[in-house]
Image (cartoon, rainbow, N blue to C red):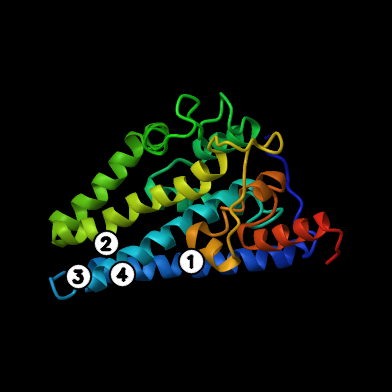
Amino acid sequence: MPQTRQQPEHHSGPAVQTAIGLGLAALIFSSWLALHIYAVFVFELTWSSLPLGLGIALLQCWLSVGLFIISHDAMHGSLAPGWARLNGAIGGGLLFLYAGFGWRRMRDAHFAHHRHAGLDGDPDFDVHNPDHFWRWYKTFLTRYFGWRSIAYVSTIVTIYWLVVGVPMAQIVLVFGLPAIASSIQLFYFGTYRPHRHAADPFGDRHNARSDDFSSLVSLATCFHFGYHHEHHSYPQTPWWALPRRRRGLAQSDTGFSR
């Protein structure tokens, strides 16, 4: 998919879409940052505080998924339509914060995914294991988590452990576990479920399916990225507008108008 300037959602102008997108991005990022600071520098892990620590890890996992989804919108220019540099700055910054990822490499790989979705040449797809979760996930990790990610995570862990003095068990719980879990969550709901081979064939060239989740469940699982066929059909639609896009398509199919 070539990097062209995307048109904003038809139901709102570019200024409105930008305001909503940046507002939600600021909310997700500030929530992630505040929780991270509390979890590392204020929270003290003990046996009695372990349930709270697990709750922190769970919420941090979900917010980490949100960081990646914001970066994904930035790749398509739908975070702030018409503001290419702003999309690149925010998307690149959040990708690096997420796992030390490089902006151009991830953006180019994602465009290749859209061009060759579910086929040979799709960096997100494992042609040898199209229906095997763990083998495909291993391929996914190998392709994306390289030396930069290892160096980034190692540096953060070393600083927190040896410089700040955070216990390793706490680092694993509130930093390591959410990072690993969020990658599994993103892969399962955003790659494996939509593009896995199953008994029912894909409907079109996008080789993608959508989950039949309610909007609330869709938000909780992967920030609406489970509405994946809608995303591939309308990649200019930001994550927060995918439920409306899905409802609009469903109404069109049944002959109703909005």
Q: Amino acid type of disc 3?
A: Leu
| Disc 3/disc 2 C-alpha distance (Å) | 11 Å
Residue located at (31% from left, 45% from top)? 152
Residue 174 at what x, y percent from top left? 27, 61
Q: What SS does tag 3 mark? A: helix
Q: Residue 184, relative to residue 14: is it above or below?
A: above
Q: What SS does tag 4 mark? A: helix
Q: Mark 4 near mark 3, Cβ–Cβ under 8 Å?
A: no
Q: Amino acid type of disc 1?
A: Ile
Q: Which residue is mark 1?
A: 28
Indicate which disc, 4 or 3, sits on the residue closer to the N terminus.
Answer: 3
Residue 257: which numbered mark, if any? none
Which of label 4 and label 2 is nearer to you? 4
Query: Residue 137 is drawn in which quadrant?
Result: top left
Residue 11 at what x, y percent from top left? 79, 64
Q: Amino acid type of disc 4?
A: Gly
| Disc 4/disc 2 C-alpha distance (Å) | 9 Å
Q: Which residue is mark 3?
A: 50
Q: Which residue is mark 4?
A: 55
